[in-house]
Image: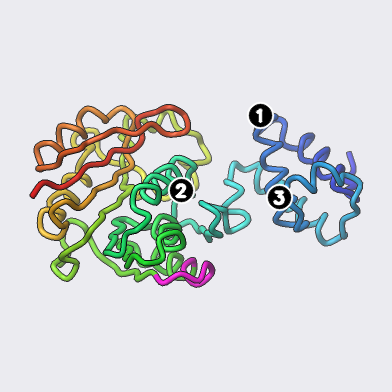
Amino acid sequence: MGVNIQTIKDIRFFLARELEETYQKQEINALANIIIETVIGVTKLHGLYMTEQPIKRDQAAKIIDICNELKTGKPVQYILGKTIFYDCIIKVTSATLIPRPETEDLVDLIINENRSIQGNILDIGTGSGCIAISLAKNLPRAVITGIDISEDALVVAKENALINNVPVSFIKGDIFNFYFEKYNNTDIIVSNPPYVRNIEKQLMNKNVLDFEPHMSLFVTDKDPLVYYKAILKVSEKILKSGGRLYFEINEVMGRSMVQLLEASGYSEIEIVLDINSKERIIKGTKNG
């Protein structure tokens, strides 16, 4: 069947036809909205109502190329090279995870609980910088630093800070072997570290397993809390008394995380449900 894409309506018809064997209908509609907004430059609402708006030949060609990549399972965010996270434009590459809506819940919680903060926030395992950048945009009086072991990820994070015009410092560091003393008197530590157990790989979508960086996702079944333990050890030295800790966590590890924070000298510990009503976030306050 020939390809004839001349209007926004044609884009939706084309994607629905070409992707029906790869994606569910709801996913195709979401992909179409993203592609139309990115390639044609119109909002979701505009694209839904101005269906007869004509498009250019080069735009149609680009949409065909995007569709062909989508058929391989490659996430649309990697194809387009960017995504939207908490109203920030975030560039993503194969060196960074794609920011998730669940992580937006983590950012939203921190912002709502710390609107007047003027102190230091440390984002450990910053990746694309999405957490640090969105916090900097919404907590302008805070001093924010992002740390990651991946130089490639840090290049992306620094670009994202420039794109969003926010002052975030990004540095290379290994949570298991890093000189953190210069970050004494930190007010908030936030982290979304690797937490998916190897045993859970079989439950994950192919597009995640084939395209996203495994070092940012997976931990051993034997010690799935290894990164949290390391961060808590660092927090003993640098987090202020009364300082706050915010983690994104594996939904099945909530009880274990509560016990870990209690043993590490934290109080006011609370598990917060994400948009899917899963135990995705834990927070606590460091005792004096």
- In the rendered structure, does residue 164 fall within the stretch colored magenta? yes
Which residue, given by chain and number where applicable, does mark 3 sit on? 35
* The one of 121 and 155 positioned closer to us in this rendering: 121
Callout 3: helix, strand or loop? helix
Horizontal side of residue 230 vs 1, given as left or right: left
Whether pointer 1 and pointer 3 mark residues with C-beta atoms closer than 8 Å, the reply is no
Horizontal side of residue 18 vs 52, given as left or right: left
The CA span between labels 1 and 2 is 21 Å
The CA span between labels 1 and 3 is 16 Å
* The one of 159 and 164 positioned closer to us in this rendering: 164
Callout 1: helix, strand or loop? loop
Horizontal side of residue 140 vs 250, given as left or right: right
Which residue, given by chain and number where applicable, does mark 1 sit on? 24
Question: Residue 21: x and y, percent?
Answer: 69, 30
Callout 2: helix, strand or loop? loop
Q: Residues within 10 Å of mark 1 (few under 14, many from 20)?
A: few
**Mark 1 or mark 3: whose residue is earlier in sequence:** 1
Image-quadrant location for residue 126:
bottom left
Mark 3: amino acid: Ile
Depicted 122 relative to depicted 104: above or below: below
Mark 1: amino acid: Gln
Q: Residues within 10 Å of mark 3 (few under 14, many from 20)?
A: many
Which residue shows up at 32% across the image and 59% down it?
117
**Which contiguous range is marked in magenta?**
160-167
Image-quadrant location for residue 270:
top left
| Residue 95 visible in the picture | no
Question: Residue 14: x and y, percent?
Answer: 82, 40
Q: Residues within 10 Å of mark 2 (few under 14, many from 20)?
A: many
Which labelled disc corresponds to residue 212? 2
